[in-house]
Image (tube, rainbow, N blue to C red):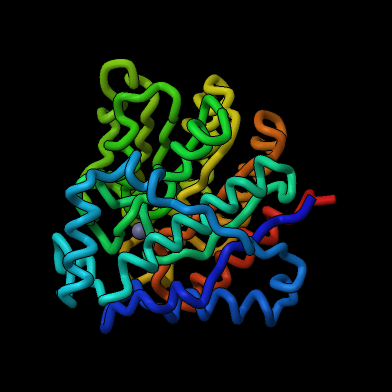
Amino acid sequence: MPTAFGYDDLFLQHRTGQHPERPARLTAIVELLKREGLYQRLTPVSARVNPDEWINLVHTAEYIERLKDACKNDLPFIDTPDSAICPDSQQVAREAVSLVLAACDMIVAGEAKNAFCAVRPPGHHAENDRSMGFCLYNNAAVAARYLQQKQGLKRILILDFDVHHGNGVQHIFERDNTVFYCSIHQHPATLYPGTGWPDEFGEGPGRGFTLNLPLPPDTEDEDFLDAYQTNFLPMAYDFRPDFMIVCAGFDGHRRDPLAQWNLSEYAYEEITRRIVTFAETFCAGRVLSLLEGGYQLGALAQSVSVHIQQLMAKNE
Ligand SMILES: [Zn+2]
């Protein structure tokens, strides 16, 4: 089964001006994949799913309307100057979710073993009722709800290896024991958004279904991989997921300007190799990987490339 690749030129229409989260990020990824001959071996996500009902499950009607109005009125940002928007941004964010849900369908139907979606805007900081940190709709959270309620899957594992804590994903599923959220990120005392402390481990019925693994600035490849192996993996085994979603941010790379980790491409290659092996054991290899951060164009494209090569590695 192939690896699916989700991308649409429409995602370039989310115009953010002088901003690290810019259209050139996706162009750099697609160009490198083509140059390396990988693009041609991937199966495109060509279908789309009407996402409105599913976005509504995660985000409040008030926020969705506010985002639409902000775009219609050509406001420069929503909720925070970090979250730059243009008149097309709500539509682009909606289309990104639409493509992500179509990728879910392909994996569940067995048309693809796994998928990587090069989407923007990113999603993991988006709260149910507001934008944060460049994120408008929470792509991973909507996908998790879609997989449960449309596809009938029960337990969804979300691993977030972006260098920033995915506050939005955590808060949306904090009280939920059917979605296990683990984030490996730079320590919140040293980096935006300041959440993701080890004592945030879920609430009420969701107690024990959130795992935060903060690591200091200057974290190296081996520290990052060790957090995966020693702290994440045993809990992931216990959870026995039906499906795995990856919030794939590559801004922990040593050349990335937004954070202070010291990772190389090898960290992303190796964690993906381990993710694929884990998913083979527990969920028939089903992995949906969604682009989050990564702001140094060369480092981003090269990291995505090794990530995709490992997603494809065991495909027959
Ligand atoms: Zn990030």
Front in this rendered view, residue 181 or 258: 181
Residue at the image position 27 percent from the left and 37 percent from the top: 171
Image location (x, y in percent) of residue 181: 41, 35
Ligand 1 image position (quadrant):
bottom left
Q: Is residue 120 above or below residue 115?
A: below
Q: Can the viewer see residue 189 in this picture?
A: no
Residue at the image position 24 percent from the left and 54 percent from the top: 64
Front in this rendered view, residue 100 or 258: 100
Image quarter of residue 66: bottom left
Q: Can the viewer see residue 299 in this picture?
A: yes
Name the residue at the top extreme: 205
Q: How many marks?
A: 0
Image location (x, y in percent) of residue 210: 36, 29
Q: Is residue 192 left or right of residue 53?
A: left
Q: Is residue 84 left or right of residue 249?
A: left
Q: Is residue 125 left or right of residue 310?
A: left
Image location (x, y in percent) of residue 284: 71, 35
Residue at the image position 21 percent from the left and 72 percent from the top: 72
Residue at the image position 39 percent from the left and 25 percent from the top: 209
Q: Is residue 53 above or below residue 25?
A: above
Image location (x, y in percent) of residue 23: 41, 78
Name the residue at the right extreme: 316
Q: Is residue 150 above or below residue 3?
A: above
Q: Is residue 298 left or right of residue 137?
A: right
Front in this rendered view, residue 19 or 151: 151
